Structures are given as C-alpha cells and as structure tokens.
Amino acid sequence: MAERSRPFTRIAAPIRSLAQRFTFLGLIVASLALILLGKVDVAAVERARVEVTDAVAPILDALSRPLDAIDNAVVEARALLDLRQENARLRATNERLLQWQAAAHKLEAENRSLKGLLNFHAPAEMSYISARVIADAGGTYAHSLLLNAGTLDGTRKGQAVVTGDGLAGRVQEVGRRSARVLLVTDLNSRIPILIEPSRTRAVLAGSNSKRPRLVHLPLGAVVAEGDRIVTSGHAGAFPAGLPVGVVASVGEGGIEIQPFVDRARLEYVRILDFGLDGIIVRQRRDGAGGDIDRAAANRP
C-alpha cells in the first residue's frame, strides 16, 4: 500500500509547490483584471458587487446574531452587577442615615429639654435679599463690590453678604438703590471667627491678597492645614456658624486662610438680615441731621 502511494506523492509534491509559488501572482493578476473590467464596464461590476453583497448578507447576518446576543448578554450581566453593587451601597447609606436619624431625634429631644431648663428664647428668623454684582469696585489696594440693592430693598450697613459657598463680606456703604460690599480679603476687613476643630477664637484679617490671615490667636493655639473656619458670632457683627474658609498654610509668615468664596466668580449674592445691631450703633445727631457711629460698649 505504501509502495502504491509513493508515485502519487512524487507527482503531487511538485504541483503543490508550484501552486504555492504562483498563488500570490495569480491573485495580483485577478485584481488587475477586476480593475480593468471595472474601468471598461462599470455597470457590470456594480451589478456583480450587488449580487455578491446580497448573497453574502444573509450569511453575515446569521453570523452576527450570536455575536449580538453575546454582547447583549455581557451588557446585561454588567448592568446587573452594577445594580447589585449600587444596591449594596444604597443599603449601607440607608443604614448610616437611619443611625444619624436616630441620633438626630435623640439630640433634638435633649435640646428641647435643655432649652426648657435654661429658659432659652430662640433668635429672630433670618431674612435675606438677593442682589446682583453690578461692578467690581476694587483693585490692587481695595477689595469691594457694588450691588444693585439699597435701602429701598431693606439693605442696612453691617449686614453679612454670602453666597452658596460661604461668607463673602459685609455691607460697608448703603445708598437708596446700591450698596458697597467690603470683602473678607480687604485690608480693612476684621471678622471674629472660630476654628472649628479646636473651638479656638481668633480674628480674620484681610491683607488685600487672595488669602486673609488669622490674628489675635491665643497662646498655645493649635491650628492645622485644612481646619475649617466659621464666624464666631461675637460682637454681634455676624451670626455664628457662617462658613468662611479653610486653613491653607501655617508657617512663620502667619496662618493663611483660603476663603470658600472666589471673588472672581461672584455674580449673585444674598444679603442676610438676622436682626443684629452689631458693634456699631448709629444715632441721629441732635439738630445736625447726620449720623454718627458709637461703640456698643457705650450703649446705655
């Protein structure tokens, strides 16, 4: 049997070798022939292409369906996995919220009890005026803004001006239809503040730069970068708890604060009215028709 197959093998081997050598050349010749045919009879080539496409389209469609099914299955599996993970996160968040809710109810009850013991009277409700920044009246040596709200709208000198981010400054001058705001970064700005983590009191002093500084810190005060700064409410100038900024740097040059409010992005603000008289009392001069300022320490 092996002897009979040897002659066939000796004949087939040269033929296979010639076919392998001339296959590439044959493909090139066929391509050139198709190109020439396409130049000579464009309509015939287009019809042939359409016929081949129509014949192959069902096969391609049949082959693509399993792939589409696999892709859809993978997408659905990923979606189910994402939903499962999201469900687990929501469950954990819900548990934490329930714990905080229980703690809040407990603190609310304790707060009512302590208020009853102290005969505590709640402060007046806060009101506010929304205003638009119409001009940046500041510069290198002054940081202030002009608002389109004045005494006709209920604006008064000394009121706090805030945005959704935090405290921007205070009303320095008031006209009938406009008001000037002294920003917390201005050199003349002085705001009593509280360093939240340590409950340390200090004064935020503007420096005509982007970062005001802390002054009048008590001896031994510990301040770290990232500490949150809020108004302390002392002297009656501002209500307590208004967010101001965070400690940006602590060094030999002092403690710099990064305000929450960016002066360059101020468009709309709120002027808060907490019913506070502040440390300045305005009185009408007798017979002079003007206003004078008197320190609150001299009030009767």
Image (cartoon, rainbow, N blue to C red):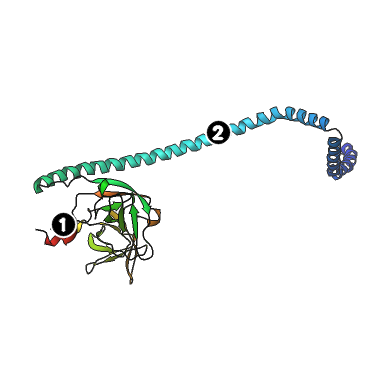
Give the secondary structure at mark 1. strand
Is 255 rendered above or below residue 119?
below
Q: Nearer the viewer, residue 11 or 72?
A: 72
In percent of width and height, residue 146 lies at: 34, 54
10 Å neighbourhood of mark 1: few (<14), some, or many (≥20)? few
Query: Does residue 168 show up?
Result: no
Amino acid marked by disc 1? Gln
Can you tell which mark lies on residue 167? none
Q: Residue at x 73, y 27 (%)?
A: 54
In percent of width and height, residue 36 lies at: 86, 38
Is 186 rendered above or below residue 94?
below
Can you tell which mark lies on residue 72? 2
Give the secondary structure at mark 2. helix
Q: CA distance from mark 2 to mark 1?
A: 78 Å
Q: Which residue is mark 1?
A: 283
Quadrant including the C terminus: bottom left
Amino acid marked by disc 2? Asn
**In-image side of 77 versus 213 (left or right):** right
Quadrant including the N terminus: top right
Q: Residue at x 16, y 42 (%)?
A: 109
Q: Nearer the viewer, residue 102 or 36?
A: 36
10 Å neighbourhood of mark 2: few (<14), some, or many (≥20)? few
Query: Does residue 179 show up?
Result: yes
Q: Residue at x 35, y 39 (%)?
A: 91
In percent of width and height, residue 196 lies at: 26, 57
Of the two numbered discs 2 and 1 in the rendering, the one whose residue sits closer to the viewer: 1
In percent of width and height, residue 21 lies at: 86, 45
In the picture as drawn, the residue positioned furthest to the bottom comes out as 252
